[in-house]
Image (cartoon, rainbow, N blue to C red):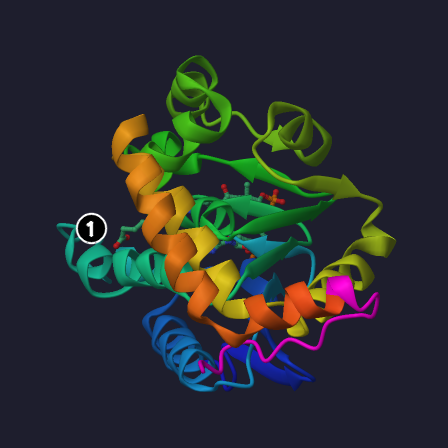
């Protein structure tokens, strides 16, 4: 039993969560899922939290499910589905729906569910030594944690299909050039860049950013007509938040805006 399967750090205006099982490349156990679920619930409930930084301890980001928990002493493997229903699927849904930006700092290999959890984050930064692996096919499984949904949307059907079927790793630079992630950078710069981005979001108009996340996600289900209607409604909602008025006033007064973030009128 790991003492602290995740580490949580409160920074000014944002929260940092570090997956912390470095000896297993931060592979998920049930205890880690529960700790992460609780930490995300606390961050969501905390109005002062306006961004989340997710990273991994040691040389990996996350190697997906800890496979030690999938083989019994008798050598049997379980029928799967339960952990997806209870942990992985709610985790991916929550990351997409958190009412503030989620930045993944991918510090090393991201494999299996670990890869797709990284890709579910709003902005993915990666160190040049990081790689992204749909490792499921190597053990007879199917990409999960949203992989079959998000991969084709990020990189197109041909690349998504080949990566899912071959489990070939994608290096950080290629992931950037394919549009799978936002930016690859020298390992030494990764955490400073991720913190800089979260510091930016910590004073951003958070209610508006939450609407942007929702609008982009909902666009996949809409035709243009429906999306134009949704944009009208979301713009109306954004304009009711005090940060819109502050943004306009600050622009006209030629001063930096002071946004209230998650606090509504
Ligand atoms: O409920 C369900 O189960 C459904 C949900 C499924 C979600 C999934 O994520 S299924 C996919 C599970 N993940 C994998 O199949 C990835 C397995 N790992 C690897 O293929 C490789 O480790 C990597 C490509 C990620 C990295 O390779 P490399 O050479 O850099 O490192 P390594 O030497 O393989 O790993 C370092 C250590 O971490 C090693 O332990 P050791 O030998 O030093 O004691 C290795 O066994 C351990 N480790 C890595 N991944 C896992 C793991 N231990 C348990 N589970 C892992 N997933």
Q: Residue at x 42, y 78 (%)?
A: 44
Q: In the rendered image, is residue 128 in sight?
A: no
Find residue 116 and report its horizontal and vertical position in percent: 44, 45
Is residue 159 on the magenta stretch? Answer: no
Classify residue 216 as left or right of residue 128: left
Judging depth in this view, the residue of 253 and 10 nearest the camera is 253
Judging depth in this view, the residue of 201 and 134 nearest the camera is 201
Q: Is residue 174 left or right of residue 72?
A: right
> Tag 1, which secondary structure?
loop
Magenta segment, prevailing SS (helix, strand or loop): loop
- Give the quadrant of the C terminus: bottom left
Residue at 59 percent across and 50 percent down: it is 123
**Which residue is at 69% across, 54% downward?**
107
* The residue carrying mark 1 has its beta carbon less than 8 Å from ligand 1: no
Residue 257 image position (x, y, % from top left): 73, 71
157 with respect to 260 (left or right):
left
In the picture shown, does residue 175 fall above or below 159? below
Percent of width and height locating residue 57:
65, 67
Residue beneath disc 1? 77
Instruction: Identify the magenta region.
Output: 251-265
Outermost residue, top side: 158
Q: Quadrant of the N terminus?
A: bottom left
Q: Quadrant of residue 93?
A: bottom left
């Amino acid at each position: 039993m790991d003492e602290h399967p995740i580490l949580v750090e409160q920074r000014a205006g944002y929260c940092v969560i570090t997956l912390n099982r470095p000896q297993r490349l931060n592979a998920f156990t049930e205890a880690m899922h529960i700790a992460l679920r609780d930490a995300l619930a606390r961050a969501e409930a905390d109005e002062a939290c306006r961004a989340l930084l997710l990273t991994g301890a040691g040389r990996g980001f996350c190697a997906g499910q800890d496979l030690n928990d999938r083989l019994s002493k008798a050598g049997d493997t379980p029928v799967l589905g339960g952990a997806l229903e209870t942990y992985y699927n709610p985790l991916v849904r929550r990351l997409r729906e958190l009412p503030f930006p989620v930045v993944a700092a991918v510090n090393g290999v991201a494999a299996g569910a670990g890869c797709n959890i990284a890709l579910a984050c709003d902005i993915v930064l990666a160190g040049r030594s990081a790689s992204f692996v749909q490792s499921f096919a190597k053990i007879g499984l199917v990409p999960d944690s949203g992989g079959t949904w998000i991969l084709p949307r990020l990189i197109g059907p041909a690349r998504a299909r080949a990566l899912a079927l071959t489990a070939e790793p994608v290096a950080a630079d290629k992931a950037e050039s394919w549009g799978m992630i936002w930016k690859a950078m020298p390992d030494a710069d990764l955490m400073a860049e991720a913190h800089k981005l979260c510091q930016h979001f910590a004073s951003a108009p958070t209610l508006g950013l939450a609407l942007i996340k929702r609008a982009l996600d909902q666009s996949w289900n809409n035709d243009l007509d429906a999306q134009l209607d949704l944009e009208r409604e979301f713009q109306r909602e954004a304009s009711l938040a005090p940060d819109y008025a502050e943004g306009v006033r600050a622009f006209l007064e030629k001063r930096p805006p002071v946004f209230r973030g998650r606090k509504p009128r």
